[in-house]
Structure formats: structure tokens, C-alpha cells
Amino acid sequence: MISTLAEQARRDLDTFRDPGSVAVVGATADPTKWGYWLARGAAAGIHRRAVHLVNRNGAMIDGHASVHSIDDIDGPLDLVVLCVPPAGVPDVVRQSLDRGARGFVGITAGLDRALGRPGAERELAAEIRDRGARIVGPNCLGIYDAGTDLQLAWGEFQAGSLGIVSQSGQLGSELAGLAAARGLGVSRFVSVGNQVDVTAAEVAADLADHDQTLVVALYVESFVDGRQMIDTLRALRQAGKHTVLLTVGGSEASRSAAQSHTGSMTSALDVVDAACRAAGAIRVDTPAQLVEVAQMLVDAPLPSGRRIAIVGDSGGQGAVAADMMGAQRLDVVPLPGPARERLAAMLPPDAGLTNPIDLAGAGERDLGVYAAVVEDLLALEEVDAVTVTGYFGSYGFYTPSIEEEEKAVARRIAGASRAYGKPVALHSMCRESATIDLIRELGVPTYHTIETAALSLSACSRIAAEPGRALEALPPRPGSRIVDGYLSARALLESAGVAFPAARRVEHLDAVAQAATELSAPFVLKADWITHKTEVGGVVVGIPDSDTACKAFDEMSARLGPGTYVLEEMDTRPDTVEMIVGGRRDPVFGPVVMVGAGGTQAELFRDTALELAPVDEVTAAAMVQRLRSHALLTGWRGKPAADIAALVRLVVAVSRLLAELPDCSDIELNPVRIGPDGALAVDALIALATDPTTVPEGEQP
């Protein structure tokens, strides 16, 4: 079942799928102009709908007559394509609305400049909405739908199963071209342009019940509403359609706005990746990568894990393939003894039988060996996917007499992949051949380089392992006020379940002496109001007794001035690991939570894991496991293991608190000391996005 968002998009955007009529305003017979390609594409659907070409001179365009203006059109208007100079767009829009137009495709750019005021195109979009219509664009390349013979864009499209939604028309066109070159056509193409009305999220949601679309390619430069986009991609995933996302920096403002180490230790793309995990989608870095991953998603079953078997007819290519798989964090697993025995019976004595499997010339003597080995490997519980690398796909190309034999082997390999529900990726030295075309048509993705095969397998394994998760909407935390300082941050975090060492507020020497009698030495003295205390000498550790505490207070207060200070018990537990737990409010995607290696060198190591908040314990545990520093928590070089469960609970608590405090911009606990007997936060920061006024109800700041 598709989501409410998808249902709404389906109702609102129906005219952009299969309009009853199309009018191209600005059509021309000049093939170097946009208006020619739009007119030519519109005319290709004339058997399905009424097509009107508007050219002020009434020119014949590719054998089709045109009219001089909107007023000369007989019959109702549905979808109008705007390809006139920007100053003329408002009049065309109003004429069309008066004739009952329901949708516009705005090709024309530069409306604000031509009309002489910022926001002019948004004002026009608001007028369109007020009169019950919608507009895609302006400044877009157009739209295409293979299933309804709707082509209102520059260029040619090959029909297929890839839906393309792109903020950049040119990049969307590149994706369509790359897909066609890989035998992967386009089901639907929408260039959203400036998104003054119809957004990329709406267009993507509209693909949830688009039968021809199997995989969605999404390029966005800015996320208008990050959480809505996540809901959209989850709806697509639930409808059985995977999304591959390409972006360029995402929400960079999220870094510059952060006030804590948390912001400086993560990038904007970290947040986008977290959004993709929540949505059950995957992000790639380049258009070529997007198409290669999409090819596997369209053609092949998803792998159920990351264990890969490699079959090569060259030891060198097999070894390189193993390196590429390892670089993508795929596991080239050793094969069990019985499997090696079966392979030994098929292959020459000098064949490699561990993994990678080196056929050692067996394929040249009998092409059927390729299929037999792949079939055996796919049957193993220890293998989730198989990669074939090397010469296969080239035999028939260079020796036509054995082409049919090679194609028969290709059918066996594709059949085994379907039968076992596991993907096979073929990396062939031959870029194009009849065998490669056939095996790709049968559901085995083919690759020109082994690194793209590895990347695609890794991406698909991540998609399989990350089906998405619902983001719980938490109500605002009742009775809390945020105020500046460590003590107020402590109080709020303690109310959420975070443990701290015992501490006292001190503002003069007598208070320091009294606090020392109530606490257990050694002590830590801190300046409450300073965010990064170490840099300015706002913290002294290892204070052994009351007299030393008073002397430390005298020195610090003389240097930093009067204010609130904190005397706190120092955590002296042995075998602790220092971590950082933080959260911040991203301006696009909302609250995010982070865990990583902590202490004063946290920014140096930048070993972090980040997710959208709030998270549950399963997600928090997965975050901790992704860290390079995870090994320190499990017992490094004979030390006892830390209480990872306590760290996980702390991550959950911080994530929920941030989600419950809409006015909070940052939360940071650094360091958090994790020992065998639990977790203690020994410094904390809570920063406000607006006026600072929050502590738990009943607490004194």
C-alpha cells in the first residue's frame, strides 16, 4: 500500500503523467531550439491525446500545423508547456488558466530577472496553485513518460524501467544517456528545476504506483523538506522500488550552524547518508555509479549478506577482484572443505580453490565449467553473491563459432542466479558482445571494470541490510527550560537518564571547602559557563584534597573572573574508554545523534557514527559497532570489556532528549567514560537555537 503522500501526489500530478491534451507554447521549426524538440516530442503522442503547437508565425513544424496563440486553440487545455521568453510567461499562464489548464511545464528560466523583481516566479506559482493548477519548474528540462507516450523534453529517451527525478535537467539527461548505454531505459523522467511548486519529493512519491518504474534515480541539490523526503523514499521502498540518490553536499548549513564538536566532526553528507539509511535508500557519488548500482537493482536479486565468492580465469584478475571487494567492505569468504573438494574434481590440479577461484584454463577447454562452478557456489549457505571476472563474454565475440555455446552457458548462470535468489555480477574484458547483451537481459548485471562491480554489490548489500525505519515523532518535553552552563545541562540530561559523577555548585572559597567535605576526592574543578574548557584552562583535574581545591579555585577565578564553578568527583575507575555522544538539529533533516571516539582528541580522530534521531537500542548498537574504536570497547589487549549496553542506552537517551527539545541546537557529552561497570558523562553542553531558558521543572540552574 502506498503512503498518504504518494496518494496525494498521484491525485495532484496526474496531468503530468497522462494529460488529455498538450499545448507547446513557443513551438518552432528550428531544430536548434528547445521549442522544436518539445513540439516534436509532443507530436509523438498525437495518437493518444490532442496536441496543440503554438507558434506566433503559424509555422509548419515537422509536418504539423501550429496556431498563433492560446486563443486559437479549439477544445479544452490540460497540460501547457512554457517555452516563450520569460517576460511573456505570465500572460501565457493566465490565458491558459482561463481556458482551464491544469498543469504547466516551465522550461523558460530567468523569470525573476526578466520581470524585474525577486520572487516573481514564486508569486506566479502561487497564482497557479490558487486557481487549482500545478507547475513543474520553471528552469527545467521537461518530462517524459514511456508508458503514456509523453515526451516533453529535449533529446531522445530509450524506454525502460528507471525513473529519473532530477533537480538539474542536464544531469538528469546524462543519467538517461548513461542508462541507455548500459541497456537500462527510462520509465519516467522529470526535471523539477526551481521547484517553485511541484517538488522532487512529490514527483518521487508519484512513482510509487508507476508500474513501469522498478528503480528510482534521484538527483537533488537541496532538500526542501528532509523528513518529507525520507517519508517519500520509505513509501517507494514499501512499494518495492529502490531509490539511488545523488547529491552534492546536502545540507552544508548544518555544519556551520553547529556550536559543539559534534558539528565539526561530521559532514553534511553524513547526515544525508543517515537519512538514506532511515529511508531504506542508498547514496552514490557520481552519475556513473548511480547507473551501475541501478542496473543491479533492476536486474538481480538483492544479496542477503556481504559474503562474496569470486570466479576468475586469471589469478591476477581474481586477486584484484578480492582487493576491490575488500575495499568495499565485502567479505571474500574461505570456502568450506566439501566445496573445495567438488571444485577440485572439476578443475585442473593447479587451480585456485580457496576464494578467489582460479579456473586455471578450465574455461577454455570447456565453457560449461563457468556455469558449473557458479552453480556450485550459489548453492552454498556461506555465499551471498558471486562475481565472475575476466574473459567470459569475450569467447563468442572473438571466435564466432563458439558464440552459441557461450550463450548457453550464460543462460545457465542466469538461471542459477534466479533459482537461488542470489546475484551474480559479471565483469568482462569485452565491453559489448552478444553474450553480454543476453546475460544482461536475463538478469545478470555486467560491468566494464571490477571496481564498479564491487561498488554495486556493496551498495545492494547495504540496501538489503537497511530496509529503513520509522522515525518516532516525540512530543515536546514538558516542564523543561534550557539555560547556559554545565550544571543546567547536567540537570536536564540526568532527568533523561544520563549518569554523572556527584558535583556541587561553588561560587566562593567557603563553598569550595564545604563541597570538598561532601564529595569524595580526587576532585575536578570546572568553570560552569565555558563551553570548551580545556582550551582556556577552565578545568583542573586530579585535585587530591580540600586545600588544593581552594587554591585551584583561587587561581582559576582570578584568571577567568567571578561566576559559577563546579567541584565534581573525578572518575578514577580503571580500564575506561573515553567516547563522545552528541546530537544536533540539522536545518533540513531535523535532529541527528552521533557517537564516536571522545576526549580532547575527538576532532583529530573523527571516528564517528551518525543517525537521525530518535534511535532505538538496535540502531544505537549498530552505530557503536560501526566505529573503528569499537575494538577498544570489547576488551583491547587483555583489558576487560566495557559496558557497551550502557553506552547504547546513553545514545538512545540523548537522541530522544534532542528530539523532545525543539529549541535545542546541540547536545554534547564529551568525554563519556565507559568502564566495565557502566557509563559516566563527565562534561556536557546543551546549546539553544533561540533564547536560553531550559532546565527540568523543579531544578535550580
Image (spheres, rainbow, N blue to C red):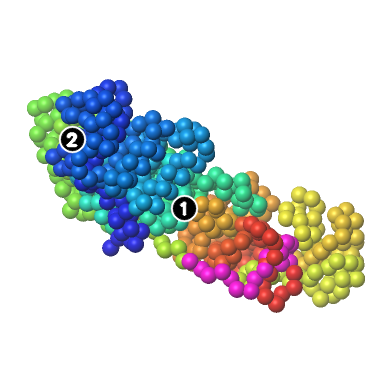
Tell which of 630 and 303 is nearer to you: 303
**184 or 445: which is nearer to us?**
184
For marks 1 and 2, give the CA distance: 36 Å
Is the magenta region chiefly helix, strand or loop? Answer: loop
Could you say where residue 295 lies in the image, as x and y percent from the top left? 28, 42
Image location of residue 647, percent across then percent down? 57, 65
Which amino acid is tagged 2? Ala
Residue at 22%, 30% in the rendered image: 66
Question: Which quarter shows the N terminus?
Answer: bottom left
In the image, what residue occupies the spot 47% across and 34% down? Answer: 115
Quadrant, the C terminus:
bottom right
Q: Which residues are magenta?
A: 473-489
Camera-near label (1 vs 2) is 2
- Which residue is nearer to you in this view: 654 or 58? 58
Q: Quadrant of residue 217?
A: top left
Tell me where residue 673 sits by quadrant: bottom right
Q: Which mark is residue 44?
A: 2
The residue under label 1 is: 225
